[in-house]
Image (cartoon, coloured by chain):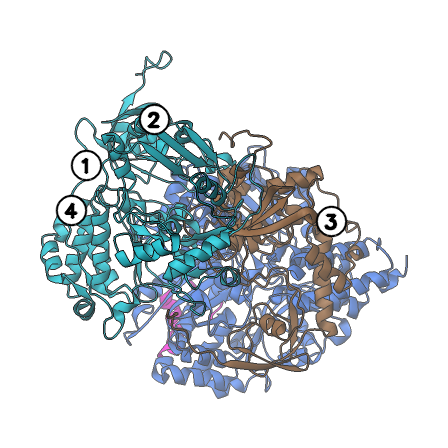
Chain colours: A brown, B cyan, C blue
Amino acid sequence: MSVGPAAAPTGLVELTIDGQTVQVPEGSALLQACRARGVATPTVCYAENLTPVNVCRVCVVEVEGSRALVPACSRPVERGMVVHTDSERVRHSRRMVLELLASATDLSLAPEVEEHLRRYGGRPERFGPAAPPTPGADHRHTQAGHHRPTDGSTAATVTQPTLIDNELYVRDYSRCVLCYKCVEACGVDAQNTFAIAVAGRGFEARISTEFGLPLPDSACVYCGNCIGVCPTGALMFRSEHEMRRNGTWDETRQQRTDTICPYCGVGCTLTLHVQDGRIVKVSSPPEHDVAGGHLCIKGRFGWEFVQVLEDPAPASDR
Amino acid sequence: MLWGSNARETHPIFFHHVLRGLRNGARLYAVDPRRTTSAQWAHAWLGLQVGSDIALANAIGREIIAAGLANETFIARATAGFDEYRRCVDRYTLDYAQRETGVPAETIRELAHAYARADRAMICWTLGVTEHHNAVDTVLAIIDLALLTGHVGRYGSGLNPLRGQNNVQGGGDMGALPDRLPGFQHVEDDAARAKFERAWGVRIPPKRGWHLTGMFEAMERGDLTALYVIGENPAQSEADAGRAVRLLGGLGHLVVQDIFLTPTAELAHVVLPAAASWCECEGTVTSSERRVQRVRKALEPPGEARDDITIIRDLARRFGHNWGSPSAEDVWNELRSLSPIHAGMSYRRLEALGGLQWPCHDETHPGEQFLHGRLWEEPLRGPRTPFHAVLHEPPVDPVDDEFPIRLTTGRQLDSFNTGVQSGLYRSPLRHGETLQISPDDGRRYGALDGERVRVRSRRGAVEVSVHYEGTLRPGLAFMTLHFPDEVATNLLTIDAADPRSGTAEFKATAIRIEKIATSTDGAEG
Amino acid sequence: MDIHLSATEASPIERAAVDAALGPRDTRPPPRDRLLPALWAVQSRVGHIGEGALSYICERLDVPPAEAYSVASFYALFSLDPSAGQPLVAHVCDDIACRAAGAEQICARLETALGPPGTPTSDGRATWRRASCLGQCDRAPAALVMAAGSQPIERALAPVDPPALQTALRDGALSPATDAETATLPRIGGASLRLLRRVGRIDPTSLDDYRAHGGYEALRRAVRLGPDGVIREVVDAKLVGRGGAAFPTGRKWEAVAHAAARPHYLVCNADESEPGMFKDRVLMEHDPFAIIEAMTIAGYATGCEQGYVYVRGEYPLAFSRLRNAVAQAQAKGLLGDDVLGRGFRFDIEPRRGAGAYVCGEETALFSSIEGYRGEPRNRPPFPTQSGLFGRPTAVNNVETLVNVLEILREGGPAFAAIGTRDSTGTKLFCVSGRVDRPGVYEVPFGTTLRALLDLAGGLPAGRTLRAVLLGGAAGSVIPPEQVDMPLTFEAARARGVALGSGAVIVFDDTVDLRRILLRVAAFFRDESCGQCVPCRIGTVRQEELLERLVSGRPHSSVRDELALLADIGRAMRDASICGLGQTASTAVESAVRELKLFADGGDT
């Protein structure tokens, strides 16, 4: 019989959520306690397989005795905490945060976030019409601590041109909610390649390679783990992007089948997304403990050999 | 300890786990002639000379003993042959090892002490250890280190060969070895054979067969005239590819079952188009950590391609046996009835648990995270496990004035083996085959970065572009085998193989770089 | 780490600058926290941080380039664009106090002469930019001029002389001889000054002079009392932090002293970036040894062997004076392995920010020192458990630490007798804007705001008070009828305002307060780190909304707009990670509430 790593025995912590008592293991976050209690808590930047960064603030709850609201995803439970997840104060902040996100970002490929927005009655149009993209605006040359003057008539957005600089990925940062998930997946939580990070600051903060270099000039190794964790479709397989552009992407006609990657002996589970007899995308189930939702370039993209390429052009000739 | 393994590129998701360990305070030592992307994460890189692994391992062993760090209790209770081992390694001093391996004595000492003192320590290796003429000896020398320190049979410790394909382990599980029946039951074990004979109703030849290299030798002798190849491309993957093609082409009958018309298939008399096992068939594969997992059919195979079970069943029918129409699960259940280590792995459990690690003896058994726990049981159950005294021997293909550069081969992140599968997606990382050399060697041999040169070994020559690689030390060159249609690297390599494993010495070839005189650049040449 | 470096090579000059900052190559790369000093080395040598230089820094530090870029692009004083990276840059303050002193006219003049901000001069060697508060409000209007080179010059021009600035930019050079540094000396108080007792009376570059004026007596007393004794005095003094949060210093020190994890760190927060604040600068520039001595006492009491003083990037003189003070103290055995020969080890490393208000937030400050983006962290854990480098950390503001010298001089109970029961001791207030004598004023807690304004000479003749912005951009608007409020933490709390760190910006009836609020809103939009949604987008929406209100073009009705403004403010206050977002709407909302600024707009 196998012996696991020596783990300190964890006790249970009792707390109150929305008037009901709940016991969860010591060290749990409030989010786990909420889920254990069956309280639906919206999240955007939280993922099971990433370290919580608590930046989206959609999951905030009210903890008695705490001046500000606290993020459920990362606040550890404490004995005797009294938590309110649906007070007017909580609903207000959640609604505002979602409205602010929706007013600045294209959420049309983020159905979960849009669902949260509906649930909290968000009306992002309250901030006025979306500002048209500024021609020639180049984030790369934004100096921290400075911004273009506004007359307030329109609501600034993160709209910018879609980046297509390689055969595998498309980056459409007009959809980016800056949840940091891609940075974490590229960094210490999975791939440790650090090809991207958050650059600049404030509203001009953006996901970027060094100096905004195209991906082929960066450290990127195309593991696609950033795509795997992106909640808004800002990062996408190029194949999906092109099918969407051509109007052929149809998730209702897609089946998902779990199998094992054909490359190397690690045994990562692949979820094949198949539409009309063709693989159109590959993902990895986060709950599977071999790969934890992450893959390498071969597993993520190396499946074309089982189907005839429509355009059999070789890879970029760089 | 990563020994002869660039897991960062060849087992990227395994390396995620290594990196998590590093963040939690683990130490990593990398033994590799190249300062690979894996080695760049290590606390120390031991950049040994190609093929000097046994000298290094024995010196580590000697230092552990000399420093009084050997686990004497474990050695006394669970091992045999220690005294002979100690005598054998006695002359592998740190100074000797430094001369033979090129690794500073102090670094070897640091590794020996770190490994011996660690609460838990693991050695993982890949083809850098096994693609040598003395591969089995090298593996035994590494195993000796684990026996010396007791880093085996316990959680977080052990010896891990990292498998290069998704079902290398599974092939072994199923008995695709010259001397084994399914479940690693020995073909020369009468009782085991009798069990299979009863179940299958046939007589099983009571002696081991040939491994791959043995088969080629038999072809050379004329003892082997017919070959059935399933899912292999030996015309390109064998060392000394020129010889392999000649022998395959000279067979009386060659059958190739593959998803592609590979160069091997092009030589065949009969080609059986197969379905891709991982997405066009149902079944299981076994990973490096002995985890049996389900593969599932997501696509219809193209054209006349059929899955392996159907092809083999029909072949049996032509031979006069009616096997019915077994599903993958039927085949699996037959295996479970004959292989005790797989007995508890029903499809239902594999689905529910996302895989199980063998041995798994019955349907209540959770599988085993690691093997050899018996070595720690009190009293010891089963035989003592032996030390093996092995001696360092340099590679077969010597580096000399005529062939002054040591070429080693390997894999890169985005590609896989001969590129049959990985060559068809549009990897932005793929830049084709190059001869990677250090900038110093480039200057010494007058080969410019990007220049097309001829690389010659004692067996053959290829033309390839030079790529300066700062992580290579002078005297060492690197090529992959991913682009055989473009540059047939294996025309250079030597087919000297380990007599026991049959694996050829892909990792150690002596080469020289020759200028290519052309009309346009002849003036420079 | 298998990092991927840029193909662009650093120039020999850039390499030399980086090597000078990082020292010779060793077997292991220098620690990550050397990143900010290395970036500064390149910025001050060539005026911008290019791809080659960044790549070389990354190679030396084993830091991935995308991460180094993410850090460099966080700071306003770094330029990453070679085309905008002129060696000489004038950062012209157009923030609250300078605006009240005519900053817009200076900017207009520069714009006419040189073009919009960021335009290079004809020889491409210089440019000008607008800047948030430079901490020179007592000498407004101000500019900070930074000239890169082998002998970089960084100097505040305050008050700025527009023709001289224009000449300097045109000539692409700033002569060191034209240094018109005018000390901000206390003009009131004389013998009753405590925290300011030495300011303007000693040579701030001389350790001997500091000792001749009572320097290092407090440390000797501290060593006699022992660490617990020191903490007891600080607890008895009821000293609370002067950085704005007013947390009891003694309790903080106790927590760090008793924390099991080692090592402990001491951090002096000298990132004084609140618009309207300059008291810490005055202390650092004119009494730097006092800060070194006080840090040594704090380190002794809390079991820290290493201290950092993090000075805002816009304070070059304060930084160089502190560096000089540290070097002298080290040379005399007052810092190092055996302080005072009493067998305890304590040393200090001055660190320099690079233009980010949020780094005054203590956890953001830790991230910045560590070589990461200055993004605040969630609490818990609190710094006393997990602060700098994840270790127990005592972090104190400059003024707080200088108070410790007073406590040791006269004892905790005597200190506690000054001020009020809950606000003990004296407080430094930075009075700026439309008063006769702007400057730092030291008064006992409990002094009224009116008395403070009187000390500063009151308003210019013939002007009437319109409002006081108490606490800076993150503070609250005090209407004229409330100027009799006593300046104590408890009185401020009772009124629902915060004393903050002591900024008092005075506006008379000539100032367009709505424009001031717009500047406050723009400030928070510029200074938000961008990490959390309520602050990142909320500060943008707040500015847009104010623009609509000020220009009289609301989307719907003024009432609806004000309701939306309140909604935004509430979410920022409730849901932001740190104090920046939580207070980004305080001034705006208090102005709307107290002054009814937009009440006359009616429906449109």
Name the residue located 67 percent from the left edge and 77 percent from the top edge.
C492
Query: Which-is-in-front pick, marks 2 and 1?
Result: 2
Query: Which-is-in-front pick, marks 3 and 4?
Result: 4
Whole-angstrom CA distance, mark 3 to mark 2, is 76 Å
Residue C507's image quarter?
Answer: bottom right
Disc on res. B392: 4
Residue B165 at x, y = what percent? 40, 46
Q: Amino acid at mark 2?
A: Gly
Residue B177 at x, y = what percent? 32, 47
SS for callout 4: loop
Whole-angstrom CA distance, mark 2 to mark 1, is 27 Å
C62 is higher (above) or lower (below) than C221 = above
Name the residue located 48 percent from the left edge and 84 percent from the top edge.
C235
Q: Residue furthest top?
A: B519
- Please give the range of residues in magenta: C198-220
Q: Is residue A277 visible?
A: yes
Q: Identify residue for label 1.
A: B396
* Chain of the residue where label 1 is placed in the rendered structure: B
Q: Earlier in the sequence, mark 2 or mark 1?
A: 2
Q: Identify residue for label 3.
A: A150
Q: Identify residue for label 2.
A: B249
